[in-house]
Image: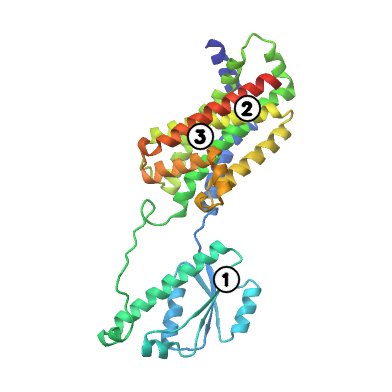
Amino acid sequence: MRTILFIIQKEFLQVMRNKTMIPMIFALPFVQLVILANAATMDMKNIDILFVDKDLSSLSAELIRKFTHSPFFNVVSRGFSEKEAEEEMLKNNTDMIMVIPGDFEKDFYKSGKSDIQVQVDAINGMTAGLMNSYAAQIINSFYSEKLSSAGPNAIRQMPLKSVNVDYRFWYNSQLNFKLYMVPGILALLLTIIGMFLTSLNLVREKEIGTIEQINVTPIRKYQFIIGKLVPFWIIALFELALGLTLGKLLFNIPMEGSLLLLFAFAALYLIAVLGIGLFISTLSQTQQQAQFLNFFVMVTFVMLSGIFTPAESMPHWAQNVNLVNPLAYFIRINRMILLKGSGFADLSIDFAIMSVMAVSLTALATWRYRKIA
């Protein structure tokens, strides 16, 4: 035990003396947290919309005013020619075109129905769906308002929905995308600390030759590995605490569940990713090789993790790969504890799977280290 404590002390001193590692541990992650939480958002704002108003009635003007006052849309222009409007979309000057026909007001008050054509730039299918949904909500709201203000005679003539639906969004009532992203970004930061820095630190020992000196000392293999991994395990947990504090102060992320439970799962997760970092270090002879392998593993984990797109909508083979993706578990558990307030009973299976991953990956890395290093 005393030997392990000496190695841990030596590692902390080495980290503090490394002028490159200190900014990587403390500065860059928080810069990424602030930038990514604000930039990586699925909220659609400032959607450029162009109106082709062939009716020029008070009703069409009211509809256009609805879009003008919406925080999601930016009315770029009004015109009378569909061809000119399509040319503007080809030039990427507008995201959406709304064509209001000539008898829009007349048909609306006569039959309660009036057609509107909406053309959406659908190069990005996800954003196109959101734009269409936002526009449909405004049009339906406009229709309901006009219907209620038209009087009882008009209501009898116009079709009226038999059921009114009031929506309530649980766990993120304002649909704030930052609340969804920040827990995922925290998981990425811990992965960087646990996997990248561990592997680079060990490979650096190979490059400068100090690992050979350690190998000829009476220090046993398990003492060396524990002494190497524990400092980064502690640093990463400290990083999680700072990240949660920053997330609360800057983004007001809710903390509905137990933070102790969150840190317990993070501790298990870090053992797993530290094992991956150790395994990568056994495969690499230089820091460049380690960076390349880390990049490959990290990108694969991130793209499959569900941080940007729901994992449930991925193909079955990708969902099967996610069964051995520790980052996917950690991001999901982070969101469940912080946003939903899930307890241990809800997460017991995930705890068991992560425990198996932590033991398996660390054992594999330890076995590999004995054979190669």
Q: Which mark is residue 95?
A: 1
Under circle 2, the secondary element is helix
Counting from the top left corner in percent of width and height, residue 367 is at 63, 21
Counting from the top left corner in percent of width and height, residue 270 is at 52, 31
Looking at the image, tell me whether mark 3 or mark 1 is earlier in sequence order: 1
Under circle 3, the secondary element is helix
The quarter holding residue 162 reads: bottom left
Say which of 351 and 30 sits in front: 351
Q: Nearer the viewer, mark 3 or mark 1?
A: 1
User: Tag 2: Cα neighbours inside 10 Å, few (<14), some, or many (≥20)?
Assistant: many
Task: Identify residue for label 3.
Answer: 239
Task: Identify residue for label 2.
Answer: 278
Left or right relative to 191: residue 209 = right
Say which of 208 and 351 sits in front: 351
Look at the image and tell me whether residue 373 can be seen: no
Looking at the image, tell me whether mark 1 or mark 2 is earlier in sequence order: 1
**113 lies above or below 356:** below
**262 lies above or below 164:** above
User: Tag 3: Cα neighbours inside 10 Å, few (<14), some, or many (≥20)?
Assistant: many
Indicate how the structure is coloured in the image: rainbow
Q: CA distance from mark 3 to mark 1?
A: 41 Å
Q: CA distance from mark 3 to mark 2?
A: 20 Å
* Mark 3 in CB contact with mark 2 (< 8 angstroms): no
Residue at 30 percent across and 69 percent down: it is 164
- Callout 2 amino acid: Leu
**89 lies above or below 103:** above
- Callout 3 amino acid: Glu
Residue at 65 percent across and 37 percent down: it is 294
* Mark 3 in CB contact with mark 1 (< 8 angstroms): no
Looking at the image, tell me whether mark 3 or mark 2 is earlier in sequence order: 3
